[in-house]
Amino acid sequence: MPTAVTLIRANDLSSVAQYAYAATAPAHARLIFLAGACPLDRDGRTGSIGDYAGQAAICVRNLTTALDAAGATLTDVINTRVLVASSNRADLVAAWEVVRGAFGAHDVPSTLFGVTVLGYDDQLVEIEAVAAVVD
């Protein structure tokens, strides 16, 4: 099924960023606002304690599960915010590389944040997303 999302690249902006600078969806698209995907298992336990990349992978898996429940996939995502509990750029990059890799050619507009703390014990990563689908 074709995606409703159109990624927009701005040639006058840096090509260093690993994402499109903007995205649109048609007026008749159904928007899906996802809660932050956390690195929790079904029983609410935090996985991959101390491992930024490992937690990012769990977050992507949970994000994909939530998207599926809403009738969408990663290619329907129109925007992400990746939150990483660290002031160390290497930790942010470790999480980002996992998230960016999961999206493949769908280089959705994204923002990567270093934050002080996240909501669950031992949580290091969280991914917020918005998706758009045409039913």
Image (tube, grey):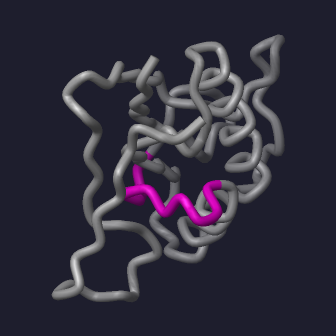
Stretch of the chain drawn in magenta: 103-116
- Nearer to me, 37 or 131: 131
Residue 128 image point, x, y percent: 45, 36
- Nearer to me, 75 or 41: 75
For residue 30, which quarter of the picture? top left
- Nearer to me, 27 or 58: 27
Q: Quadrant of the N terminus?
A: top right
For residue 134, which quarter of the picture? top left
Disc count in the image? 0
Horizontal placement of 106 versus 51: left or right?
Answer: left
At a point 46% along the width and 48% down the height, the residue shown is 83
Residue 81 image point, x, y percent: 40, 47
Horizontal placement of 23 versus 72: left or right?
Answer: left
Horizontal placement of 66 versus 79: left or right?
Answer: right
At a point 46% along the width and 17% down the height, the residue shown is 135
User: 120 above or below 103?
Assistant: above
Residue 33 image point, x, y percent: 39, 23
Residue 5 shown in magenta: no
At a point 25% along the width and 34% down the height, the residue shown is 26
Residue 45 image point, x, y percent: 80, 22
User: 105 above or below 1?
Assistant: below
